[in-house]
Amino acid sequence: MLEAHDLAARRGDAQLFSGVSLSLGPGTALFVRGPNGSGKTTLLRILAGTTQAAAGRVLWRGEQVGPFHPALRACAVFIGHAPALKDELTAEENLASLATLHGAPAERAAVLEALNAWSLSRQRALPARVLSQGQRRRVALARLWLLSRPLWLLDEPATALDDAGQVTLRDALAAHLAARGIAVIATHQDLPVASGAHQSLLLA
Amino acid sequence: MSEAAAQPPIERGGWPGVAWALRRDLRLALRSKAELGVQLLFYVVVVSLFPLGVGADPTLLRALGPGVLWVAALLASLLSLPRLFAADFADGTLEQIALSPYPLPALISGKILAHWLTTGVPLAALSPLLALQFGLDGSELVALAAGLALGTPTLSLLGAIGAALTLGLRAGGALLALLILPLYVPILIFGAGAVEASRVGLAAGGELSVLGAALLVAAIGAPLASAAAVRIALD
């Protein structure tokens, strides 16, 4: 489903990585590891289609996809370092707004259920500006619940999450893989997956 | 969680994208009303400084009026432009907007429309009142308000291109002014010209038609150009 051949990336003059290939079938998770500055985020951004690779190509369902390709925009959900929350809006409004932006029908019940799954029901009416880092991360991740996209691209999803949050993330990932989804996760922490195949990619 | 392999339709229409961006930006603007007030107050203060500065000679004021009102409107419109994309860029929302299945030019059109509704419309609505300080009356007030109503959306549209091009740059605000103000010149000439024409008793229809034509061209071109600039900024 998701393939990449001989990807290379550079930031400024520095070569981050080259010759990175991957092939992920349904129900597979790929953990991208490597030291700071090794290009984990850049690799994810290339797969998400916001950054142009210096070389190589990405294929989604057998079709070559470049930056901002419609097929990627319809199928992938990318959660980067920035949680994409507006400080002025409440947690509930933020979540509903992001779900609508990605074309998912954001019925109130579904939004509340997603917030509940991430233990945010008490914070749903609070403006995002007063939420803690971990709570902001939870709101960002709750989007995964609403969108039901086949391809997850998560950049350090466990950052600032407490133990309970990491368990929720792990369960969500297991459910996603069980539903034949694909996930690419850049991470330092170990996120043991209960079910589904997983691969590791080490960027030097 | 629902079936992850379900295939959402790939091509999506533009109108829901326009509606999403318009609704969200209007809601955000209503949550931070102070920002709207600052821009409007800036317009009022700048316009009011001129009669105080040049003295109370009615002929001079009537001659200066159209130009002063229009220049102040350009500057006030410029004041709020850096915020058009910068906040969304900083918190990661712009990335999500660019990755949305809706066409990016449509989403940007919605943002520009919201920008005009919250900045251009109050300016155009307030201008006849401020024009009284310059002794303008009757048909001149109508030409001023009509000109601003047709011209301010073009200011927002052209400004969006500049705001997108200067995303993420240091001193982006000053660069934005240098980049955009020259593009505002034709709007200024025909907008102030419309008031001038009715002041000397001519019909302002010609100038207003040019403003309308400029608006149509900008409405088609600016969202596409801004979308291209936003994508470059995100790379």
Image: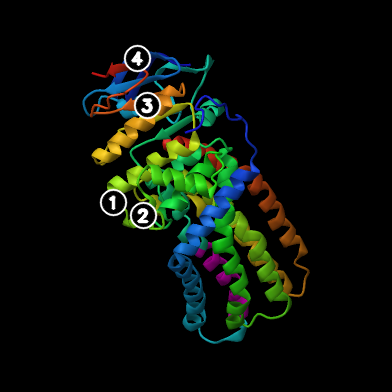
Query: In the rendered structure, which disc, 2 or 3, sits on the residue that comes first in sequence?
Result: 2
Residue at 56% from the left image edge and 39% from the top image edge: A103
Q: Residues within 10 Å of mark 2 (few under 14, many from 20)?
A: few
Say the numbered circle drawn on residue A122: 2
Q: Marks 4/2: CA distance?
A: 44 Å
**Foreground: disc 4 or disc 2:** 2
Residue B72: image location, x then y, percent: 52, 68
Q: Which amino acid does the dot numbered 3 rest on? A: Ala
Q: Marks 4/1: CA distance?
A: 36 Å
The chain containing the residue under callout 1 comes to A
Q: Which amino acid does the dot numbered 4 rest on? A: Val
Query: In the rendered structure, which disc, 4 or 2, sits on the residue that comes first in sequence?
Result: 4
Q: Marks 1/3: CA distance?
A: 26 Å
Residue at 76% from the left image edge and 75% from the top image edge: B201
Say the numbered circle drawn on residue A20: 4
Q: Which amino acid does the dot numbered 1 rest on? A: Ser
Q: Marks 4/3: CA distance?
A: 26 Å
Residue A110: image location, x then y, percent: 50, 44
Q: Secondary structure at mark 3?
A: helix
Q: Residues within 10 Å of mark 3 (few under 14, many from 20)?
A: many
Label 3 sits on residue = A174
| Main SS category, magenta section | helix
* Magenta span of residues: B60-76
Query: In the rendered structure, which disc, 1 or 3, sits on the residue that comes first in sequence?
Result: 1
Q: Marks 2/3: CA distance?
A: 26 Å
